[in-house]
């Protein structure tokens, strides 16, 4: 049976039905939210088997959503750019836009309702044997279910009058909804409302876009004008890069992070990989970028009409080569990262750095020290994992995990300075780790108390490193960790409140706020560090010490340790790119927008200069007569 794709008179009727059915389902889910029957219904559903087991649940949780969005963007983008009929171009825009719009609306509703997931402590459920640990307040509605429902609705709206098999697409949101409940990451009302939202958005946008021809302009000059407009608009964007105290969120106007001359000169080539320093949850960022990379590949291969195929392939190969080279240089830390500056007297120090680390180091200590000095950092503290410092002449330290890292997730503590303190704490016995990779956290608690007493007796400063991330990584076992109050009772001097990149997860921020309140209440030390293992090329987290310091290295180390014992002289610093975190599918374009908004005027001029050079070199020459 041949299927002819074209507009028909019943498509608007089907779109209206989809929108109304979605609205009713959404209202049903909203009505059921928090009703007494939801908890027993959830427990009943959790007791049933799932086809495919843990592997099938994992595929639907992590892989399928990204694959689904990627295919919609790539295939939709191809149909939009290369379609020869109005219908094919219109259909391409629908498949490229509707899933992303559904995801954006879902994210806004999640933020508005802030409903705890079933695994959240506020839900009061005692769940065991979970495959996915997720305990934030982003339960209502389900994003997985809404996007799957929008794709299913698009398939039905497109093919309903041409083939009965299209109704099999309804299995997508049904299977996805069941998987979200089976993983205990959503309540039944969440998936009902999410499914309804997907049908509603698909129907509404189909009605809006129906029979419109989104043909691309034939001339490239408009693209260059649009790019120049992007540079101009982002220059006046109000939500630009900011320098903050990572704990309190207070703005630090007297601190700046300025690009070095090498970066300005080659900004279009080195600026992108340097932005990885600002990417929280890098794995999710990569997943969110995959669909947009696919769309960019469509642009490279299919958009230039009339260009020979070998030229398009050569252009795509050149772009991938550039990505590979820049990514490799970023991983090696060879890119010219920005330089820290301050309008107040003092120095920048990085008190959590790994050089030639025998556990997980990625770069030798000498290279890291040279790179840090080029970034305006006066002094480092070497804190390799359960190992002595690799170089003399800097602040001595160790990141202590009782030899459990990286075999198990355990708290890490920084021990800085002190005569023989590092040697003494490294003599303590290791923490037992079971065959399944779980450390004995009860034994760890008693060992921490012993370690802190030894280190303080030797004159060292003891800080809790990235506690909020350890707590989030442990999931259900996070309750076995010491609370911030318990850490204080064990005798620690303070906490890290900034580490490697700006924190954006809701769980991490909640724990960080608790740490901040305890530290400020008790006048404890608060620091921000790069936790640099050799990558990326620069971190937006640093610590500033107020006062004057000697140029002599030995004297300066003593002055730094003395300043750390006066918390009022210590200022943790973090540079951010805008407020909040974007929904996963939109994380890549939002990051691009924030990158351009953060550019200085010389960097913008560098972009324009390189674009003009490429345009001149790549223009098509007319044959001479």
Image: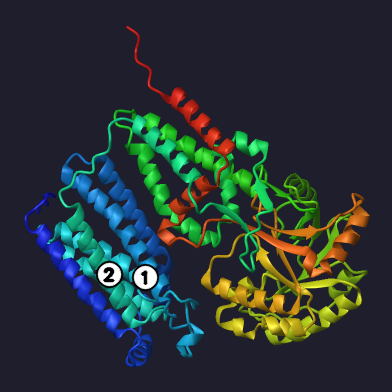
Q: Is residue 379 above or below residue 24?
A: above
Q: Position of residue 23 (x, y in %)?
A: 22, 72
In depth, the one of 187 and 407 nearer the eye is 187
Left-right relation of 241 to 375: left
Tell us which disc is closer to us: 1 or 2.
1
Left-right relation of 97 to 238: left
Q: Is residue 440 visible?
A: no
Q: Secondary structure at mark 2?
A: helix
Q: Position of residue 243 (x, y in %)?
A: 63, 56
Q: How is the image coloured?
A: rainbow
- Circle on res. 109: 1
Q: Position of residue 590 (x, y in %)?
A: 45, 53
Left-right relation of 284 to 350: left
Total label count? Answer: 2
Q: Is residue 21 visible?
A: yes
For the residues marked 1 and 2, what is the alpha-carbon distance in whole angstroms?
10 Å
Q: Quadrant of the C terminus?
A: top left
Which residue position holds label 2?
Answer: 197
């Amino acid at each position: 049976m041949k299927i002819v794709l074209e507009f028909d008179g019943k498509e608007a009727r089907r779109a209206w039905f989809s929108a109304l059915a979605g609205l009713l389902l959404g209202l049903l889910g909203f009505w059921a939210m928090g009703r007494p029957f939801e908890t027993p219904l959830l427990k009943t559903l959790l007791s049933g088997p799932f086809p495919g087991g843990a592997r099938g649940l994992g595929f639907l949780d992590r892989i399928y959503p990204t694959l689904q969005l990627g295919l919609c963007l790539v295939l939709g983008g191809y149909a939009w750019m290369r379609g020869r009929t109005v219908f094919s171009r219109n259909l391409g825009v629908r498949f490229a836009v509707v899933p992303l719009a559904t995801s954006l609306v879902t994210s806004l509703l999640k933020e508005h309702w802030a409903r705890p997931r079933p695994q959240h402590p506020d839900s009061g459920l005692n769940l065991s044997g979970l495959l996915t640990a997720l305990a934030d307040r982003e339960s209502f509605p389900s994003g997985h279910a809404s996007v799957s429902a929008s794709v299913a609705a698009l398939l039905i709206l497109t093919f309903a009058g041409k083939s009965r098999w299209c109704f099999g697409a309804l299995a997508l949101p049904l299977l996805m909804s069941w998987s979200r409940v089976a993983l205990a990451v959503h309540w039944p009302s969440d998936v009902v409302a999410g499914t309804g939202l997907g049908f509603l958005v698909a129907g509404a946008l189909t009605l809006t876009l129906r029979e419109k021809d989104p043909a691309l302009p034939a001339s490239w000059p408009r693209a260059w004008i649009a790019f120049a407009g992007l540079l101009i608009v982002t220059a006046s964007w109000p939500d630009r890069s900011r320098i903050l105290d990572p704990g309190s969120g207070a703005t630090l106007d007297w601190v700046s992070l300025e690009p070095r001359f090498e970066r300005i000169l080659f900004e279009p080539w080195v600026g992108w990989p340097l932005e990885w320093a600002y990417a929280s949850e890098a794995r999710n960022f990569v997943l969110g970028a995959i669909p947009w990379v696919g769309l960019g590949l469509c642009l490279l291969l299919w958009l230039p009409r009339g260009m020979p195929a070998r030229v398009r392939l050569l252009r795509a190969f050149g772009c991938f080569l550039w990505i590979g080279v820049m990514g490799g240089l970023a991983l090696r830390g060879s890119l010219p990262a920005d330089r820290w500056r301050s309008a107040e007297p003092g120095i920048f120090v990085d008190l959590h750095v790994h050089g030639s680390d025998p556990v997980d180091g990625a770069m030798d200590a000498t290279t890291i020290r040279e790179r840090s000095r080029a970034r305006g950092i006066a002094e480092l503290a070497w804190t390799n994992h359960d190992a002595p410092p690799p170089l003399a002449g800097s602040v001595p330290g160790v990141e202590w995990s009782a030899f459990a890292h990286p075999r198990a997730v355990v708290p890490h503590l920084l021990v800085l300075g002190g005569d023989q303190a590092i040697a003494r704490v490294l003599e303590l016995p290791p923490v037992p780790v079971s065959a399944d990779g779980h450390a004995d956290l009860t034994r760890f608690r008693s060992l921490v108390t012993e370690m802190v007493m030894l280190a303080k007796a030797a004159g060292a400063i003891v800080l809790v490193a990235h506690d909020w991330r350890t707590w989030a990584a442990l999931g259900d076992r996070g309750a076995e960790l010491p609370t911030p109050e318990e850490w204080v009772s064990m005798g620690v001097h303070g906490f890290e409140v900034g580490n490697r990149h700006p924190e954006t997860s809701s769980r991490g921020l909640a724990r960080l706020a608790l740490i901040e309140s305890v530290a400020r209440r008790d006048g404890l030390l608060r620091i921000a560090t790069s936790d640099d293992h050799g990558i990326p090329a620069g971190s937006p987290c640093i610590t500033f010490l107020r006062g004057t310091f000697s140029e002599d290295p030995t004297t300066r180390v003593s002055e730094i340790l003395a300043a750390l014992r006066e918390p009022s002289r210590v200022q943790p610093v973090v540079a951010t790119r805008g407020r909040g975190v974007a929904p996963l599918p939109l994380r890549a374009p939002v990051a691009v927008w924030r990158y351009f908004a953060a550019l200085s005027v010389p960097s913008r001029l560098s972009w324009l200069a390189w674009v003009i050079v490429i345009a001149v070199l790549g223009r098509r020459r007319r044959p001479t007569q």
